[in-house]
Amino acid sequence: MGRIRNQAAWWRGRRSRFLARRLKAGVARVVLAAWLMAPRIDVEANDFPTLDRVDQVLTCMKGHGGQTLDNLYACSCVVDAVAAALSYDDFVEATTFRGLKSMPGEQGGLFRESARGRKLVQRLEEAEERAARSCFVGVGRSKRSPVASPPAVPPPVVPPPVAK
């Protein structure tokens, strides 16, 4: 009788181990299928370091009237649009060429006469222009929307005090 109980326990244990292995294999298949079917994230489109993004936003805000909420949204939109148009390496190279082409003499000539530099600067400027138009840089909220805030009411006219 004891032997039969031991055999029954042995078969139950064997069956549970078998089911556990099948369950693990099934879970592994599901995880693998989900990983393979997951959309790929394009890392190249967002490879600008945070420090450079913040620097560009602050520089843009300084050039368009200071640190206001409108400028923050517009300038961060511009930086995102430029980051989508150029890789970070191209952006750094283009800003280097643009900044150093005004250097006088022969050293500046290296930056002024480079065909690659001109092409990169042109791409950067086109991206910045498109971004400035689409992100409403320099335009306040009331100028952006067709339904602006109600017209300002002129202050009441107070008659001057009468001299006695």
Image (cartoon, grey):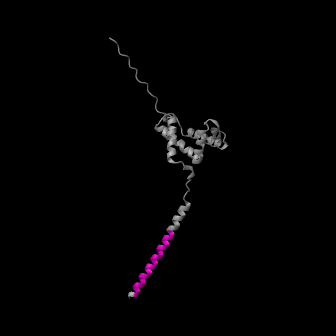
Q: Considering only vertical position in the picture, is 115 above or below 150?
A: below
Q: Nearer the viewer, residue 66 or 118?
A: 118
Q: Where residue 154 sits: x, y (%)?
A: 43, 24
Q: Nearer the viewer, residue 7 or 55?
A: 55
Q: Place residue 4 in its image quadrant.
A: bottom left
Q: Considering only vertical position in the picture, is 81 above or below 155?
A: below
Q: Residue at x 57, y 38 (%)?
A: 133
Would you say residue 161 sits in the magenta stretch?
no
Q: Residue at x 60, y 46 (%)?
A: 90
Res 145 visible? no
Q: Considering only vertical position in the picture, is 17 above or below 120?
A: below
Q: Where residue 112 sits: x, y (%)?
A: 64, 39
Is 107 placed left or right of 71 in the picture? right
Residue furthest top in the image: 164
Q: Residue at x 56, y 50 (%)?
A: 45
**Total of numbered circles in the picture?**
0
Q: Nearer the viewer, residue 124 or 32?
A: 124
Point out the image quarter for the C terminus: top left
Q: Place residue 8 in its image quadrant.
A: bottom left
Q: Considering only vertical position in the picture, is 51 above or below 12?
A: above
Q: Which residues are magenta?
A: 3-26
Q: Residue at x 60, y 45 (%)?
A: 93
Q: Nearer the viewer, residue 82 or 59?
A: 59
Would you say residue 14 sits in the magenta stretch?
yes
Q: Where residue 147 sits: x, y (%)?
A: 50, 35
Q: Where residue 57 sits: x, y (%)?
A: 51, 41
Residue furthest left in the image: 164
Point out the image quarter for the N terminus: bottom left
Res 93 visible? yes
Label the magenta part by its dominant secondary structure: helix
